[in-house]
Structures are given as structure tokens and as C-alpha cells.
Image: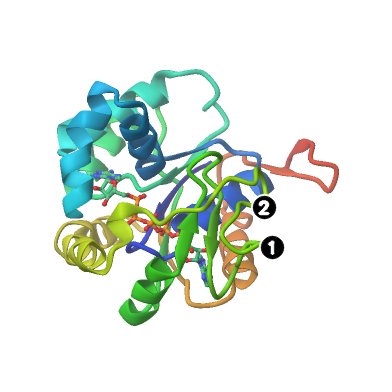
């Protein structure tokens, strides 16, 4: 099963992709995480991406399309995958369709998480992340056990530089101008499902699973309660 997670900044894409990946035993790629990792390591990709990310703008399509094509060419994606943060423009969506068509595949379902803008800005303002292991927290809805420190590795939590209010607002404007048309693109293909992302994390996950586990065609996997992937 090939799933795209679509939604504005702060909608919960990363949170849901982690959980769905475990439930469905599918690998996922988060392009934002990949770019931040490249920035932290100071690679050529990181140096290229940094000014765009710091301004809250999109990294150029050709760069992102190459990244996804390279990822798709690596082993481990035979039973499907989940994409978080890609495609973000209609050009990227077309390139993904072309890459999948070359291997006789296509996007099975696009989950579009809709959340009111004010709630998005509050989520972004309250988000703290672990620079070591990548765990994400929210001051109000999912605080760490010990304030300021990661539950998983004990590192000091930080805020993402692009979560500052003015950059977050720019990201939101860029989303409506460049990413929102992707909703229409997938709607026309009949593969889009809108989920109310303003519910609790578990309610959103249940709604997504209800959609994905009743897809009519293609084989997909899930983990049973012991964590073993099983065909359903
Ligand atoms: P990226 O990292 O993908 O940022 P984003 O799309 O702006 O999304 P976020 O990570 O802010 O939010 P999310 O939807 O994942 O929400 P999360 O689960 O964290 O991209 C960053 C940048 O990289 C882009 O601006 C761009 O420059 C570049 N880039 C990346 N991909 C690109 C591409 N394809 N093309 C070009 N450029 C690209 O949740 C947010 C907060 O809310 C958390 O604190 C969480 O705990 C909380 N939360 C989550 N769910 C709930 C809930 N149900 N209720 C209450 N709180 C919740």
C-alpha cells in the first residue's frame, strides 16, 4: 500500500506517520526530517536547503524529486510505504505518479489532515523537539515527563528555528499557495480522503486506519499485537 500524508504545517503529519508506520508495518520517509538531518550534518544538500527552510519556503522541486526517486530506488519498499511532506507541489505529485507508473504502481490513498489555522499556529508554537533522537513534544498536549528534557534519550529539547511565529506564518502562506492545489490534484484522481486532524491523536489514527484497512485492492500489511507483520 502506498500512502501520502498531506496537510498544512503542524497538522500532525509526522505524528501520524510514525504511528501508521508501526500499525501497518510500512516504512515512511519524512522529507522535512531528512532535510533537517542534512543541515545538522552540514552536507551539500543541507547547505542548499538551509536558506529555504529558514525563510519558510519550499526547497526547489528538482532537488526534492531526486531525493524521492533515490529513496524509491533503495530496497525495502516492495510492500509499500508512507510519504510525509512529499509531494508538496503539483509538479512533485506528477513526478511521483510518473516514477510509480514506471514500476506499475500508483498512490493508493492520500490522507489529507484538515485543521483550523489558529490551532495549527498553536501547535507549532508549543512544539519542542529532541535534537538527538528526533522525538517531538507539545507543551500542552504531549509534554515530556521532565520539563525541557527528552523522555527517550534525556537530551535538552529545543524549538525548530522555522517554528518562530513569523516563519510559521510564511510556511502557512506557502502551503496555501503551493501545496493546497495538490489536494485538488488527488481529489480528481479519486484517491483523496479528508480526515479531521483537530481531534485527539488516537481519534485521528483510528479514522485513518478505518480508511486504509478497508481499501479494496492491492495487498497491505499490518502488525498483529505481537508486532509481526501479517497479510490481511
Ligand atoms: P516539514 O518538516 O515537513 O514541516 P511541515 O510540513 O511544515 O510540517 P510540520 O513538521 O511542522 O508539522 P506536522 O504536520 O508533521 O505536525 P507534527 O506531527 O509535527 O518541512 C519543513 C521544511 O522542509 C518545509 O518548510 C520546506 O522548506 C522543506 N521541505 C520539506 N519537504 C519538502 C518538499 N517536498 N518540497 C519542498 N520543500 C520541502 O505535529 C505538530 C505539533 O502538534 C507537535 O507538537 C505535536 O505533538 C502536536 N500534535 C500532533 N497531532 C496533534 C493532535 N491531534 N492534537 C494536538 N496536538 C497534536
The residue tagged 1 is 145
Marked residue nearer the N-terminal end (1 or 2): 1
83 left or right, relative to 179:
right
Secondary structure found at label 2: loop
Q: Quadrant of the C terminus?
A: top right
- CB atoms at circles 1 and 2 under 8 Å apart? yes
> Who's the residue at 56% across and 62% down the image?
208
Count residues near mark 2 (Cα–Cα under 10 Å), then give few for <14, some for 14-19, many for 20+: some
45 left or right, relative to 226:
left
Residue 109: x and y in percent read 45, 52
For residue 170, what is the image quadrant? bottom left
Residue 73: x and y in percent read 40, 19
Count residues near mark 1 (Cα–Cα under 10 Å), then give few for <14, some for 14-19, many for 20+: few
> Who's the residue at 37% across and 53% down the image?
160
The response on whether ligand 1 sits within 8 Å of label 1 is no
The colour scheme applied to this rendered structure is rainbow
One can see residue 117 in this view:
yes
The residue tagged 2 is 151
The response on whether ligand 1 sits within 8 Å of label 2 is no
> Who's the residue at 60% across and 67% down the image?
143
> Who's the residue at 39% across and 39% down the image?
106
User: What separation in Å lies between label 1 and label 2 (alpha carbons)?
Assistant: 6 Å
218 left or right, relative to 59:
right
Secondary structure found at label 1: loop
Q: Check residue 215 in the rendering and tell me which mark sits there, or answer none.
A: none
For residue 40, what is the image quadrant? top left
Camera-nearest residue between 63 and 190: 63
Amino acid at each position: 500500500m502506498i500512502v501520502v500524508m498531506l496537510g498544512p504545517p503542524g497538522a500532525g503529519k509526522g505524528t501520524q506517520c510514525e504511528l501508521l508506520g508501526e500499525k501497518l508495518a510500512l516504512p515512511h520517509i519524512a522529507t522535512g526530517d531528512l532535510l533537517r538531518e542534512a543541515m545538522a550534518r552540514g552536507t551539500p544538500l543541507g547547505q542548499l536547503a538551509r536558506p529555504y527552510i529558514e525563510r519558510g519556503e519550499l526547497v526547489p522541486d528538482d532537488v526534492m524529486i531526486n531525493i524521492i526517486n533515490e529513496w524509491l530506488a533503495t530496497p525495502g519498499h516492495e510492500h509499500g510505504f508512507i510519504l510525509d511532506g512529499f509531494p508538496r507541489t503539483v509538479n512533485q505529485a506528477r513526478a511521483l505518479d510518473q516514477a510509480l507508473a514506471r514500476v506499475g504502481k500508483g498512490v493508493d490513498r492520500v490522507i489529507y489532515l484538515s485543521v483550523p489555522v489558529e490551532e495549527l499556529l498553536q501547535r507549532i508554537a508549543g512544539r519542542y523537539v529532541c535534537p538527538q533522537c528526533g522525538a517531538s513534544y507539545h507543551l500542552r498536549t504531549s509534554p515530556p515527563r521532565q520539563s525541557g528534557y527528552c523522555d527517550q534519550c534525556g537530551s535538552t529539547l529545543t524549538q525548530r528555528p522555522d517554528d518562530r511565529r513569523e516563519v510559521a506564518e510564511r510556511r502557512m502562506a506557502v502551503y496555501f499557495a503551493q501545496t493546497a492545489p495538490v489536494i485538488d490534484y488527488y481529489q480528481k484522481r479519486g484517491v483523496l480522503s479528508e480526515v479531521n486532524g483537530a481531534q485527539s491523536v488516537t481519534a485521528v489514527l483510528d479514522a485513518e486506519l478505518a480508511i486504509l484497512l478497508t481499501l479494496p485492492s492491492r495487498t497491505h500489511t499490518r502488525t498483529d499485537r505481537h508486532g509481526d507483520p501479517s497479510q490481511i
